[in-house]
């Protein structure tokens, strides 16, 4: 039975507080949900910050410090800080906290793309904060900037200078070729941990055919021994596609960043609820969940003792 990595993305920058009362916003909420997710079986915690008063996505180091030290103290999970932040942030803002914290692992988006969230406005709701509706409306003119220069800067400043390894987020086939480009330049070394992202309007659709094709192309570009793939999918496609990934020998990501539900029409009450569900599924498939120490060894991480938390 092969080992499987479960990543949990706790809060993200896509959903807004009005969409679910269970979305963690404050540092204490993110820390508590992260602890529970790790106890449920998540070996990697993917981390964004929010303004604790408004729930707005935040790049402020003080907001990351509201939960990173607690998670580093109370769990042995790998802390994976986002360098994507929110698509409306500058790269300097997105990098401020990761550069200060120097995590073991960081996410890295592999291409510039449209990042359209406005379809989530289709449901009537009472908005808790005045920023939420305009934020979603304006994504019909939003470009998520991740140029080759941006990517090279992140690889150097976080990877070379601070020893972080990366979760390479690929929203489309072109992003795999960009990753191959940076491997050819010698700026990254295997094993490559590649996260296929499905269901964001502007990236790949959440179709099973897209997953099988991405795996075929990753095999062609990187060889079967040099990379690991994981899958995340937005909304109601989360569990079907990550289950497919597990059955194909890949790894999985769940969490309230990606989907607010645990079943059709039913809000998940916590990140841990989603972790527990996917853990049961993958174990029934004969997969064994990797503990954090095995994840560190598999991905060549520098160790939790080397982060600034």
Image (cartoon, grey):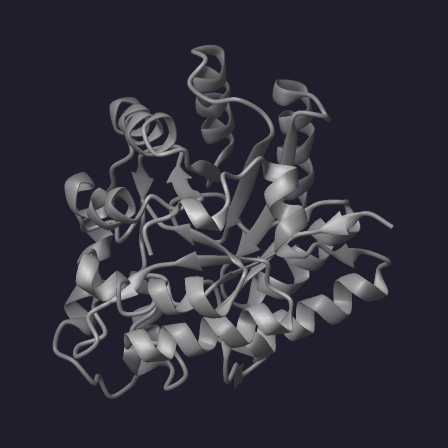
| Percent position of residue 8, x then y | 52, 62
Residue 142 in picture, x, y percent from top left: 21, 48
In-image side of 252 versus 249 (left or right): left
Q: Residue at x 31, y 23 (%)?
A: 152
Q: Residue at x 61, y 49 (%)?
A: 207
**Whether residue 124 is visible:** yes
Asked whether the viewer can see residue 137, the reply is no
Q: Position of residue 56 (x, y in %)?
A: 20, 69
Looking at the picture, how far across and down is residue 302, in whole percent? 49, 39
The reply, left or right, for residue 135 in relation to residue 215 is left
Q: Is residue 100 above or below residue 55?
A: above
Q: Quadrant of residue 285?
A: bottom right
In depth, the one of 35 and 255 nearer the eye is: 35
Q: Which image quarter holds the C terminus?
A: bottom left
Res 125 → quadrant: bottom left
Report the front residue among 224 and 120: 224
Quick check: 262 above or below 38?
below
Residue at 18% from the left image edge and 63% from the top image edge: 62
Q: Residue at x 28, y 30 (%)?
A: 157
Count of all numbered marks drawn on residues in the image: 0
The residue lying toward the viewer, choosing from 133 and 41, is 41
Q: Would residue 186 appear left or right of 85 to someone viewing this image?
A: right
Spot the residue most to the front: 305
Q: Residue furthest top?
A: 185
Furthest residue in direction left, as rendered:
130
């Amino acid at each position: 039975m092969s080992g499987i990595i479960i990543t949990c993305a706790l809060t993200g920058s896509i959903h807004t507080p009005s969409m679910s009362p269970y979305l963690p916003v404050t540092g204490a909420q993110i820390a508590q949900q992260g602890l529970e997710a790790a106890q449920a079986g998540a070996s990697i915690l993917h981390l964004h910050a929010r303004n604790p008063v408004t729930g707005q996505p935040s790049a402020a180091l003080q907001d990351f410090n509201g939960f990173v030290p607690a998670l580093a103290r109370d769990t042995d999970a790998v802390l994976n800080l986002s360098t994507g932040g929110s698509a409306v942030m500058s790269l300097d803002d997105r990098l401020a906290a990761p550069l200060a914290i120097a995590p073991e692992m960081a996410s890295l988006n592999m291409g510039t793309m449209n990042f359209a969230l406005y379809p989530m406005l289709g449901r009537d709701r009472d908005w808790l904060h005045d920023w939420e509706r305009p934020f979603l409306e304006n994504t019909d003119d939003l470009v998520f900037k991740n140029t080759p220069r941006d990517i090279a800067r992140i690889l150097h400043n976080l990877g070379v200078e601070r020893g972080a390894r990366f979760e390479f987020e690929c929203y489309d086939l072109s992003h795999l070729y960009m990753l191959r480009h940076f491997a050819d330049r010698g700026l990254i070394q295997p094993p490559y941990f590649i996260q296929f992202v499905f269901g964001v309007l502007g990236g790949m659709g959440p179709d099973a055919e897209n997953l099988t094709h991405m795996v075929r192309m990753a095999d062609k570009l990187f060889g079967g021994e040099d990379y690991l793939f994981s899958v995340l999918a937005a909304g109601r496609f989360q569990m079907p596609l990550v289950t497919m990934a597990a059955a194909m020998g890949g790894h999985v990501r769940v969490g309230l960043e990606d989907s607010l539900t645990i079943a059709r029409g039913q809000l998940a009450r916590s990140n841990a609820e989603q972790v527990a569900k996917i853990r049961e599924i993958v174990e029934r498939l004969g997969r064994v969940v990797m503990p954090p120490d095995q994840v560190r060894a598999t991905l060549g991480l520098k160790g939790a003792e080397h982060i600034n938390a």
